Amino acid sequence: MFDLIARVLAFFYSLIPSYGVSIVMLTLAVMIVVTPLTLKSTRSMLQMQRLQPELKAIQTRYKDDRQKMNEELMAFYQENGINPLGGCLPLLVQLPVFLVLFRVVQGITRHATDFGLASGWMSGRGSLQSSTTVGLSDDDLVFDPENLPVESDMFVDLTQTNEMNFLGMDLSKTALDVAGANLVDALPYFVLILVVLVSSLFQQKQIRGRSTGAQINPQQEMIMRILPWMLPVFSFTMPAALVVYFVISNLYRIGQQAYITQSLYKGDDSLGAQAARSREEARKDSGSGNRKGSGGRTTEKKGQPTPKRSDANRSTGKGSAGKKSGAKGSGAGRTGKAPTRQRSGGRTTEPGSPQHKKRKR
């Protein structure tokens, strides 16, 4: 895979001998090749969202029989022509391709090591017994590109130079290295990084703007907020050749997302609109189910709601009336009349008793 992509890069350089243009053409070629996988992944994801209510119904119906549930789900997938892994499998296939592309572009910026040059210089000076040492920087060393065919024009040109000039930049240098030497010379690098940031934010806005109402995990939401800022930060420490790759891939994805939005999300009959309606119906059904089940406490016996207190009082009205009348006659109940007493000196005596008459006299 490394050799294949490196050969394609060398081929584009043979057509237009420019390091930057060859990187741009290679990036576009790879993005065009993987575009069908991206479209297939998006369609499969929308199909799953559109059929989510039916899938949930099957899972609820056979929740106690997992084997039967899996059989019904597979039959449902085959009937509707969808693949449960169709949303993530194309993305997993693309990941190695982009990693290889990243490594190939990074490999052409590798400089030859100065170990052999310094050793030869020291051995030549050894007869003079000189204590002088030599140190060669990357600016003094030619390139030693990886994976490129040795007979290609790009390999031959890189092994004879120590710069990769493109639009006023050396693509083998990082923005931090150039800014450390001369801030003015680093301005083109900063502009390139700014384009990476703006394109990343715009691409995220495109994706969030066509949301079908799907609930996003809080961790995923946090990653989506941070990710557009991470790539520009990394770009400060990466060779400008890789930053060119980031810019072109981001700009291509912006156009790709615009096409996906127009073809899959626009119109009432589009997959995106159908998925949004399915999610809204599922949300309404779950809400109505919760309201139906909230009609008071249920007994363990038959799942019937407990009788209201007023109904219970009406049903037991006769018995309670009898109890009240009994309490009334006893003289000691809650509704009866207590014996009349008078307080004198903190003690109570019955009217007419000897103690009462004695105290009165």
Image (cartoon, rainbow, N blue to C red):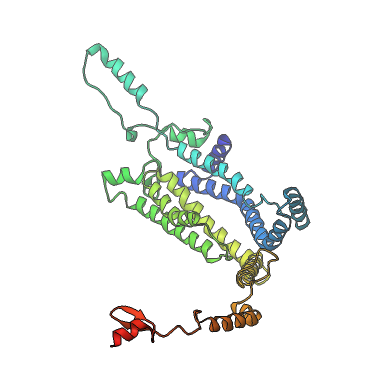
Q: Position of residue 333 (x, y in %)?
A: 51, 79
Question: Which residue shows up at 22% across the image and 13% down it?
Answer: 129
Which quadrant is home to the C terminus? bottom left
Nearer to the camera, 248 or 291: 291
Q: What quarter of the picture does the N terminus occupy?
A: top right
User: Residue at the top extreme?
Assistant: 127
- The image shows residue 185 at horizontal and vertical percentages of 30, 49
Asked whether, in this view, residue 163 is left or right of residue 182, the answer is right
Q: Residue at x 70, y 58 (%)?
A: 60
Judge whether 175 appears above or below 273 on screen: above
Instruction: Report the residue at 33% width, 19% height from top.
Output: 119
In-front residue for pair 154/190: 190
Report the residue at 54% width, 32% height from top. 149
Q: Nearer the viewer, residue 245 or 19?
A: 245
> In this orientation, which residue lies closer to the viewer: 287 or 117?
287
Say whether residue 34 is left or right of residue 127: right
Where residue 268 sits, quadrant-wise, is bottom right
* Residue 355 image offset from top left, x and y in percent: 34, 81
Above/below status of 162 relative to 322: above
